[in-house]
Each structure stands twice: as structure tokens, then as C-alpha cells.
Amino acid sequence: MTELLATCWTHAGRSYPLPGRDISPLSVESRSEAVAAAGFTGIGLDYGDLRAYSSTSSLKDLKRLWDDLGLVHVELELLTEWWKDDPAERDALERRRFLLDAAETLGAHHVKICAELSLSDDDWVEAFDTERLAPNLHRLAVDAADRGTRLALEPMPLTNVVTIREGRHLVETADHPALGLCVDIWHVERGRSSLWDVRNLPAELIVAVEIDDAADERVGSFFEDTIYHRRLPGDGDFDIPGFVSAIRATGYTGPWGVEILSNAHRLRPLKRAVQVAYDTGRRAVDPDFHNETDSGDSTIVRNA
């Protein structure tokens, strides 16, 4: 049976991937227990929550909790500005050190990374210089491998590595087995990638896969649409069956992340939020799935 991973925002409650708003009001312990009870075998945490947790508790204790709960697939995010290696760039270097150290302690399956990020459609970001920066990415992959984890580069329209093809070119140029891609249906549908691009990826280049859904038309800016308007799988217009088929054609056998960021999802009680995320995610990747606790009424799921 396909295993599912609850990405960090799926169980974060009323928090956002925005500076100063990225720490969940919910405890990591309660989130972990709810995720496991829903049926997930994987869990994600972001940098802000990891930092906050580690200031009062031991990551080794968190590792023991996840092991006890059967959460065996761990995803950490988001590593940004990884190309900065000047000692003066202390924040970027500290974020990199912390996430890789945490990955080692927690036995993380992977750490998600991205290229230069823009929060506005009007922001200009410099074109990514693959040939110049690939050696930096190779060195980062060496560091990740030394800690027993992999890196999942996520191509997305909000960065200057937009498409699956661009991400693949960067990963193949950096050339390290600890390096691959995070393939999210959101960025395929909202960006300039195609299912052909997905279907033709070598399985070894896919480190992580994510599913979600949305209306056919974008709502607001790319960033606003991304963090406020995602829907549960099956509750929108994305070609989920085509995406699942394309991923399966590659031979990928790892966990599937369910990533829901939306105003509606943030308002759901924690247990209900992760349960509907699991049930709809499971039906997306295994269409014959039926949960005894699920009414099967899509209207109830949609308005949960």
C-alpha cells in the first residue's frame, strides 16, 4: 500500500509560510499524534517549528516519539539561500547547519530546498546560473549524504528554477546521488511543466512527491494562491489521475506527501484536518480506498 506523509502545513493549524507567522500554535506532540492516528506514516516539520521545539525540548526525544508512533518518513523544510557560502551570511549558514543537523538526529528521509524565492509577482529575481551554482549544490549534497539524508529541490513558479526541466538540469549538473527533486502537482499545474516532463523523470531523481488540488483559475498572485487557496485532493480541477499515473510510470516507490495550505484548512480542528487530508490523499493515489470512518460524502469533506 502507498504510504502517505503529512507535510508540515497540513497539520500546522493557523500558521503561514510568512516571516514571523510560521510557528504553529499547536504543539508538535499533538500534531504528531493526530497525524499518526489519521493513518499517515510520514510527517514534515518546517524550520520555524523545529527551532521553537528545539529551544525547549530535545530532538532526540522527538525522534523517539515519531518512532513510537510509526512515523518513519520524515521531511524537513525549507532550506533557502543554500548557495551563500560567505562567512558574513551568518543567517543562511546557520539555517543550513541547523536543518542538516536536525535531519541527522531525526533520521530524515529528505530536506526540501528551493532556489531564490519571490513573494510577489512583481518582484524580480536574477536568472539562476546553473553552471556557476551547481558546485555549491554538489557540496551541499555531500553534507546531506554525510548526515544520512537527501535533498529534494522543489521547482516552482515562485522561484528562479520554475520547471521540472530546469530543476532536472540543475540536479543532473550538480551530480550527486543525495540530490533529487520534489515534484508537487501544484507547481506542475500552476507552472510551465507538463505531465510528460514528470513521466520521463528517472525514478532515482525523484526524492519526494506532493499532491493537493485547486480551482482551474489562479486566485490572486502566485504566492497568495499557493498559501491561501489550495484544496483537498479531488476537490478541485487538477488532473490528479494523470499526475499519479505519470509518477507511477517513473517507478517511484517512496511516500506521497499531502500538502494543504488554505484558509479553510487552517480553520479545521486538528484531528479533522489531518483525517480529511489523509482520506482524500489516499483516494487520490489509491482510487479504490475506502475508510470506515469516512462518510464518502464529498460535500462533507469539502466543507469540513
Image: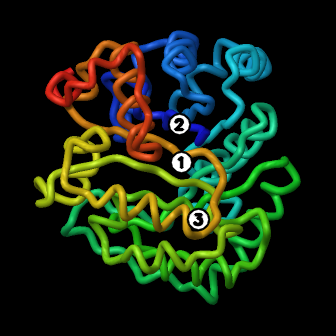
Q: Is residue 52 above or below residue 235?
A: above
- Circle 3 packing at 10 Å, graded few (<14), some (14-19), many (20+), is many
Q: Amino acid at mark 3?
A: Leu
Drawn side of residue 118 relative to residue 299, left or right: right
Q: Residue 18, percent across and down?
A: 34, 40
Q: What whole-number distance in Å separates the C-alpha atoms at marks 2 and 3?
A: 18 Å
Q: What whole-number distance in Å separates the C-alpha atoms at marks 3 and 1?
A: 14 Å
Answer with mark 3 or mark 1, whichever residue precedes in sequence.
1
> Which residue lies at the image location 49% right of the left edge and 82% below the top edge?
165
Dividing the image into 4 quarters, which one contains the N terminus?
Answer: top right
* Element assignment for label 1: strand
- Circle 2 packing at 10 Å, graded few (<14), some (14-19), many (20+), is many
Drawn side of residue 299 relative to residue 161, left or right: left
Residue highlighted by disc 3: 181
Say which of 275 and 100 sits in front.
275
Drawn side of residue 187 relative to residue 151, left or right: left
Q: Residue 104, percent across and down?
A: 80, 39
Residue highlighted by disc 2: 46
Q: What is the tally of numbered marks visible in this picture?
A: 3
Question: Residue pushed farthest front?
Answer: 288
- Circle 1 packing at 10 Å, graded few (<14), some (14-19), many (20+), is many
Label disc, if present, on residue 269 of the rendered structure: none
Quarter residue 44 falls in: top right
Quarter residue 202 falls in: bottom right
Q: Is residue 11 above or below residue 218?
A: above
Q: Are marks 1 and 2 in contact (CB under 8 Å)?
A: yes
Say which of 255 and 229 sits in front.
255
Answer with mark 2 or mark 3, whichever residue precedes in sequence.
2
Q: Amino acid at mark 1?
A: Leu
Say which of 136 and 31 sits in front.
31
Residue highlighted by disc 1: 78
Q: Are marks 2 and 3 in contact (CB under 8 Å)?
A: no
